[in-house]
C-alpha cells in the first residue's frame, strides 16, 4: 500500500533547532540570512543566529521576536577555526542537538586572475569556502550523534557561469561550495545527514546598495539594478526571501529524499545560453 504524500503545511520546522550563520544584513531589506531566520522561526524552529556584526544581528533577532519566534544570537567570525569549533560545541550542549544548519556567509570582491591580489584571493576563499567547510566540520558530529540533520550551504550563480563581472575568487569559492556539499552529502548519507546547496542568482538584496554598486557601477544603484535585471528571463529580481524559501524546503522533511544537489534560484538566468 502506498503512503499518502504529506501536504506542505505551516509549522514544518516545529521543534527543530536551526543554526543560521550570516544572519545579519548589511542594510535594510531581506538579505538571505535575515530572511531565512524569520522564515524558519515562522515555521516553528528555534533559531540560533550567528554573525560578526552585532547591530545587524540584533535587528534580525528583533524581527524574529516581533513575530513570536524563539531566537538566540551569538557573535561569531566564521573564518576563525577555534571560534567556530567552540560555537558549535557550545550550541550543541546548550540546545541538546542541532537539526539544521544554514551556511550563509560570503561576499564578492571584483577582480580577475591578473588584478586580484594573492591576499584578496586568500580572503575570498576563507570567507566564502573555508567558512562553510568549518561549519560542516564541526556540526556533522553533533548531527550524527543526534540521529541526523540537514545542512544547507549557500553558493552563487557565479559558481556556475559568468555573471557579468570578473570576480574570480568569489566564483571559484562558490563553485567549490557546491562540490563540498555533494561530497559531504554522499559521505554522511548513512548518518541520515542531508547536505544540499541553494544557488542564488542576481537578487536585489541589501548588498546591492551597500557594496556592489560601488564596485561595478560607480555607485549608481539604478544602473546596476538595470544591468542585473536585464540578465533575468523572468524580468524581475527576487530577494533574500526567495533564497530562504528554497532553504526551507531543503531543511524540511519534505526534502527527505533530496541530498547532494542544488536548487538554483535565479529567475532562469543560468539557463540562458547568451
Image: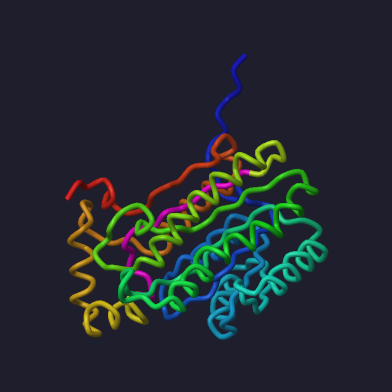
Let me know if residue 133 is in the magenta part. no
Q: Residue at x 54, y 65 (%)?
A: 38
Q: Residue at x 62, y 77 (%)?
A: 77
Residue 170 placement, left or right of 84? left
Residue 214 placement, left or right of 43? left
> Considering depth in this image, is 224 or 62 the residue closer to the camera?
224
> Considering depth in this image, is 55 or 52 the residue closer to the camera?
52
Magenta span: 194-207
Q: Position of residue 208 (x, y in %)?
A: 33, 75
Identify the image quadrant of residue 62.
bottom right
Which residue in the rendered view is the most extreme toward the top? 1
Q: Position of residue 172 (x, y in %)?
A: 41, 60
Q: Position of residue 246 (x, y in %)?
A: 46, 51
Residue 137 placement, left or right of 103? right
> Considering depth in this image, is 16 or 258 the residue closer to the camera?
258
Q: Position of residue 129 (x, y in %)?
A: 52, 63
Let me know if residue 204 is in the magenta part. yes
Quadrant that contains the N terminus: top right
Identify the image quadrant of residue 120.
bottom left
Q: What colour scheme was applied to this rendering of the protein?
A: rainbow
Amino acid at each position: 500500500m502506498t503512503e499518502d504524500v504529506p501536504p506542505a503545511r505551516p509549522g514544518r520546522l516545529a521543534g527543530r533547532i536551526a543554526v543560521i550563520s550570516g544572519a545579519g544584513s548589511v542594510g535594510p531589506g531581506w538579505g538571505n540570512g535575515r530572511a531565512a531566520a524569520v522564515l524558519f522561526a515562522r515555521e516553528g524552529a528555534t533559531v540560533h543566529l550567528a554573525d560578526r556584526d552585532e547591530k545587524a544581528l540584533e535587528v534580525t533577532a528583533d524581527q524574529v521576536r516581533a513575530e513570536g519566534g524563539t531566537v538566540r544570537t551569538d557573535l561569531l567570525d566564521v573564518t576563525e577555526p577555534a571560534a567556530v569549533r567552540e560555537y558549535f560545541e557550545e550550541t550543541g550542549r546548550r540546545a541538546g542537538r542541532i537539526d539544521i544548519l544554514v551556511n550563509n556567509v560570503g561576499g564578492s570582491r571584483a577582480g580577475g586572475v591578473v588584478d586580484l591580489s594573492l591576499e584578496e584571493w586568500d580572503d575570498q576563499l576563507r570567507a566564502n569556502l573555508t567558512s562553510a567547510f568549518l561549519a560542516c566540520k564541526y556540526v556533522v558530529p553533533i548531527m550524527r550523534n543526534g540521529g541526523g540533520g540537514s545542512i544547507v550551504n549557500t553558493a552563487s550563480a557565479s559558481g556556475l557561469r559568468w555573471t557579468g563581472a570578473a570576480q574570480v575568487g568569489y566564483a571559484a569559492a562558490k563553485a567549490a561550495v557546491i562540490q563540498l556539499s555533494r561530497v559531504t552529502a554522499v559521505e554522511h548519507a548513512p548518518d541520515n545527514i542531508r547536505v544540499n546547496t541553494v544557488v542564488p542568482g542576481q537578487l536585489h538584496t541589501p548588498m546591492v546598495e551597500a557594496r556592489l554598486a560601488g564596485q561595478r557601477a560607480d555607485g549608481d544603484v539604478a544602473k546596476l539594478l538595470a544591468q542585473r535585471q536585464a540578465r533575468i528571463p523572468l524580468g524581475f529580481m527576487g530577494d533574500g526571501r526567495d533564497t530562504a524559501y528554497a532553504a526551507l524546503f531543503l531543511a524540511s522533511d519534505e526534502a527527505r529524499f533530496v541530498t547532494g544537489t542544488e536548487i538554483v534560484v535565479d529567475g532562469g538566468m543560468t539557463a540562458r545560453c547568451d
